[in-house]
Image (spheres, rainbow, N blue to C red):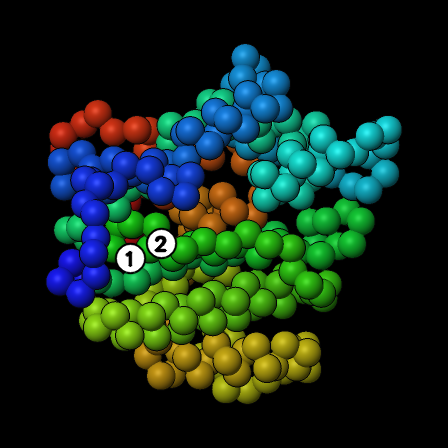
Amino acid sequence: MDITYKIKDLGQLRYFSGLEIARPAKVIHLNQRKYTLSLLEDSGTLASEPSKTPSDPSIKLHMNQGTPLSDPSFYKRLVGRLIYSTHLTSAHRVLHYLKNSSSQGLVFNPDSTFKLSAFADSDWACCIDTRKSITGFCVFLGSSLISWKTKTQNTVSRSSSEAEYRVLGSLVCELQWLDYLFTDLHIPISLPTSVYCDNKSKIYLAHNPVFHERVKHIEIVCHIIREKNQKGLIHLLSIPSADQLADAFTKALSPKSFQNFICKLCLCDRPTWGGMLISFLP
């Protein structure tokens, strides 16, 4: 590019679009420490007591909980910066968690294999007000986390199987897009992608060509998943619930379970080490 365009070399990248980039040893570490500290300072919680988890597993939020705010503008600004829709007390809990984890970031290991793996899960009918379910999935390239999602599903699922299949449908679309992206970049990816589920009925249904009356309402989603499975894009595998990493994206967890999942998601503090990253994937 320097031959065609006039480029000024600013040296090794350290900050970009709110991200802090560090390159210890042979890995790349991304975090948002500066942005997080600015958020804590602006919200007046820089000196707050830190929390080990972003949410309290004993609290179930609903529309009629708490007292309406006389001026919701602060809450709206806070949620806008957190990109996390919840009540003010819970929003403060997120801030306390950020206080405890402001230096944490993603680690990318260039020695990782070019093999995708993914985890998918849902929290069925978890919203007290609407009974909508939560979609949660994460995708790894080798040992590096490259894509993740947590979102309330658009419609109410009539069963846990339907909720789980909607998650798989969203994940399959993400994996297909990633396959197209790597193809455009001329990066060979080893297929199929291993997709880990903690619900064996999903796996059986994905391989079963017969639709029963109880699952006809999710027939289209099932067809999409089965088609991608047959074409070799994905390979569904069973995994114990205790090892389902997508749980960190769908529900509030105890500090011990949450920290265990955070470690397996390869979220680490700002690096001061010189060793290599260990893969925790199955």
Q: Residue at x 44, y 67 (%)?
A: 174
Left or right: where does residue 196 sit relative to residue 49?
Answer: left
Please tell me in which quadrant of the rendered image residue 228 appears: bottom left
**C-beta proximity under 8 Å, tags 1 and 2:** yes
Amino acid type at circle 1 is Leu
> Compared to 212, does 171 lie above or below?
above
The secondary element bearing badge 2 is classed as strand
Residue 43 visible to the viewer: yes
Residue farthest to the front, as pictured: 6
Q: Nearer the viewer, residue 98 or 226?
A: 98
Q: Nearer the viewer, residue 37 or 266?
A: 37
Dot 2 corresponds to which residue?
Answer: 146
Mark pair 1, 2: CA separation: 6 Å
List x then y, in percent, for residue 151: 60, 54
Q: Residue at x 52, y 70 (%)?
A: 169
Q: Residue at x 57, y 77 (%)?
A: 221
Left or right: where does residue 232 sit relative to residue 208?
Answer: left
Q: Nearer the viewer, residue 108 or 160?
A: 108
Residue farthest to the bottom, as pictured: 210
Dot 1 corresponds to which residue?
Answer: 141
Rate crowding at label 2 as few (under 14), some (14 to 19) or many (20 or more) other CA atoms within 10 Å. Answer: some
* Mark sitting earlier along the chain (1/2): 1
> Compared to 36, does 243 lie above or below?
below
